[in-house]
Image (cartoon, coloured by chain):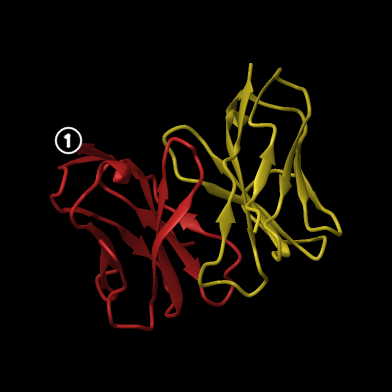
């Protein structure tokens, strides 16, 4: 059983650029959630994807967007990067209806915006 | 909106001793789930223990146990016989049983285990 894989592990972007982060969900999981974890903070919910549709969104602007593919993998896209977007981005996969847990987190992508 | 508060930014414990991490939360919901996650330097969030709000019995997982006080909206984690591998950031998290598509995390407690 494979876990959640995120790529890349680290990257550096310039303010105003666009970035795409990728997440492969755990085998058997059909739902992917994305979180932003700023330094010294807990993760903040960005959005969740289920059956290739957005299934809930946190307090993030529209320049944060996502996709989910038929194989349940997902992408997080951020346009017009700002310095405050520097953070660890975590992906978590789960099986729909798994409110009690059953979430598997990846090791994240560390994004630095300069 | 639900909020989760962890008032201890840092804690330390001697190896083999017991430590308790505190967490309080605010919600108007009656049915929800509470979690403790561990985040080691590898950055992956690892589930330590979880509690269903409708259960009065406190959850236990080996050396980890919780003290769930629903009326006080308190959910503390007790780690017994602390081991060096327990050193990590610990996050308390809330999840609604009804809308349940997101975790609300606290700001974390950094636990140091002293040999």
Name the outermost residue toward the front: A1
**Element under disc 1:** loop
Residue B46, image x, y percentages? 46, 53
Q: Please give left or right for residue A38 compared with residue A58 in the image.
A: left
Q: Examine the image and state in which quarter residue B66 appears.
A: bottom left
Quadrant where the C terminus of chain B sits is top left
Q: Which is nearer the eye, A104 or A78?
A: A104
The residue under the point 82% across, 60% down is: A52
Q: Please give left or right for residue A67 compared with residue B49 in the image.
A: right
Q: Please give left or right for residue B62 compared with residue A67 in the image.
A: left
Q: Is residue B41 above or below residue B21?
A: above
Q: Examine the image and state in which quarter residue A51 appears.
A: bottom right
Q: Examine the image and state in which quarter residue B31 appears.
A: bottom left
Q: In this view of the protein, can residue B110 be seen by the observer?
A: no
Mark 1 — on which chain does it sit?
Answer: B
Q: Please identify which colour was used for chain B in the image.
A: red
The residue under the point 77% across, 23% down is: A17
Mark 1 surroundings: few (<14), some (14-19) or many (≥20) residues within 10 A: few
The residue under the point 48% across, 37% down is: B42
Q: In this view of the protein, can residue A45 be seen by the observer?
A: yes
**How many callouts does the rendering have?**
1
Chain yellow in the figure, letter: A
Residue B32, image x, y percentages? 45, 74
Residue A45, image x, y percentages? 58, 51
The residue under the point 44% across, 39% down is: A41
Residue B88, image x, y percentages? 35, 41
Q: Is residue A38 above or below residue B85?
A: above
Q: Is residue B79 above or below residue A15?
A: below
Residue ID for mark 1: B115
């Amino acid at each position: 059983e494979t876990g959640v894989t995120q790529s890349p592990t680290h990257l550096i972007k310039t303010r105003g650029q666009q970035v795409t982060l990728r997440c492969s969900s755990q085998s058997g999981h059909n739902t992917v959630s994305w979180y932003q974890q700023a330094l010294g903070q807990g993760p903040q919910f960005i959005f969740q994807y289920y059956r290739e549709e957005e299934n809930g969104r946190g307090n993030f602007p529209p320049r944060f967007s996502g996709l989910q593919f038929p194989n349940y993998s997902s992408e997080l896209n951020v346009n017009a990067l700002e310095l405050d977007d520097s953070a660890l981005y975590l992906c978590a996969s789960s099986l729909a209806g798994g409110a009690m847990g059953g979430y598997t987190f990846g090791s994240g992508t560390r994004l630095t915006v300069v | 909106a639900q909020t989760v508060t962890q008032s201890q930014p840092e804690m330390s414990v001697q190896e083999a001793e017991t430590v308790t991490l505190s967490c309080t939360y605010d919600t108007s919901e009656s049915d929800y789930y509470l979690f403790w996650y561990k985040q080691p330097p590898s950055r992956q969030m690892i589930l330590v223990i979880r509690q269903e709000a409708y259960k009065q019995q406190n959850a236990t997982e080996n050396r980890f146990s919780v003290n769930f006080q629903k009326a006080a909206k308190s959910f503390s984690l007790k780690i017994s016989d602390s081991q060096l591998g327990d050193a990590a950031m610990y996050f308390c998290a809330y999840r609604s049983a009804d809308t349940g598509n997101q975790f609300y995390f606290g700001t974390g407690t950094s636990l140091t285990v002293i040999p």
